[in-house]
Amino acid sequence: MRVSIIGLGGIGTSIGLAYQHAELGDLVLGYDVDSEAVWGALALGAIDQPVDSADACADADLIIVATPPQAVPELFRRLAPRLCPETVVTDVVSVKLPVLEWAHASLRHPNRFVGGHPIAGTEQHGYRSARADLFQGAQWVITPTPETDADAVERVERLIRTVRAVPVRMDAAQHDREFALLSFMPHCLAFSLTMLHAENPTLLSGGGSWRSATRVAQSNPELWTELFWLNREATAEWLDALTERLQAISDALRMEDRARLRALLPLARKPS
């Protein structure tokens, strides 16, 4: 089988590394707009063969789109006239509804598209951050629709299991709402805390709690601007709910209401 990975950043290169580690004997092609990423992925062993354009990836049996989200609509338009009816296309974008809309708008065979999202990213990016074990035991969401071909879903799930992740089928809207809470909120907090600190420098460096709370602020702000925007409705709803909770804590402190303050803090979890 021929597998094409378009986008050789941390996720795309990690997919290649994990897939190659399985030693299936398939041919893995790779393309990125950054030639350094292509040759870096080749040197790491994440791909077998570099190609010089996204168009050259179109004749693969399975195409994995691992580009930033803003590149996906144009990429789908370029691939569309070159895709075989049997080719399966999947992606790794952290927001699923917009990608499904782009696929249905541009791909000639949208029934061969399977939206995907490995929940295994880190704040690091670029091919140098790639790891063969990145997906081991991680959930990998796929968002097939009623029109999606069953064998296309099976092929993507086979890829997911090959890289040692766990496939989870989910409605795209549910994914976007849940992930806005589970990932977008921590990123909003981390970016906000980091900027608050920059505006209010401290003599103390902060301990483990500060490092944990701000770690993902090292993520690419351009990427996260795009992700927040694409999932803006769910993100704004969760931010409103979070703001209400933070305001309630502030009110309890200002009103010197200790009982109310305690009620706003969750019970400590017992160590597992």
Image (spheres, rainbow, N blue to C red):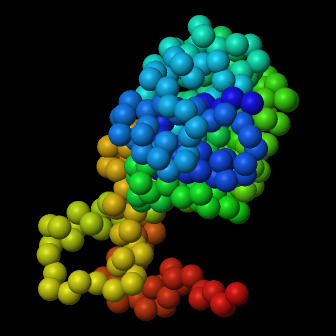
Quarter of the image where the C terminus is located: bottom right
The answer to whether residue 161 shows anywhere in this view is: yes
Give 264 or 82, whichever is nearer the viewer.
Answer: 82
Q: Residue at 54% of width from left, 19% of height from top?
A: 56
Q: Dividing the image into 4 quarters, which one contains the N terminus?
A: top right
- Position of 89 compared to 185: left or right? right
**Rendered image quadrant of residue 104:** top right
Q: Quadrant of residue 206?
A: bottom left
Residue lying farthest to the right in this orientation: 150
95 left or right of 74 in image: right
Taking 32 as reference, is 41 above or below it? below
Residue 24 in the figure: left or right of residue 233: right
Residue 195 higher or lower than 6, as above or below: below
Residue 129 position within the rendered picture, expressed as x and y whole percent measured from the top left: 44, 57
For the point 59% across and 57% down, the residue is 132
65 and 141: which is toward the camera: 65
Residue 177 placement (x, y as % from top left): 59, 48
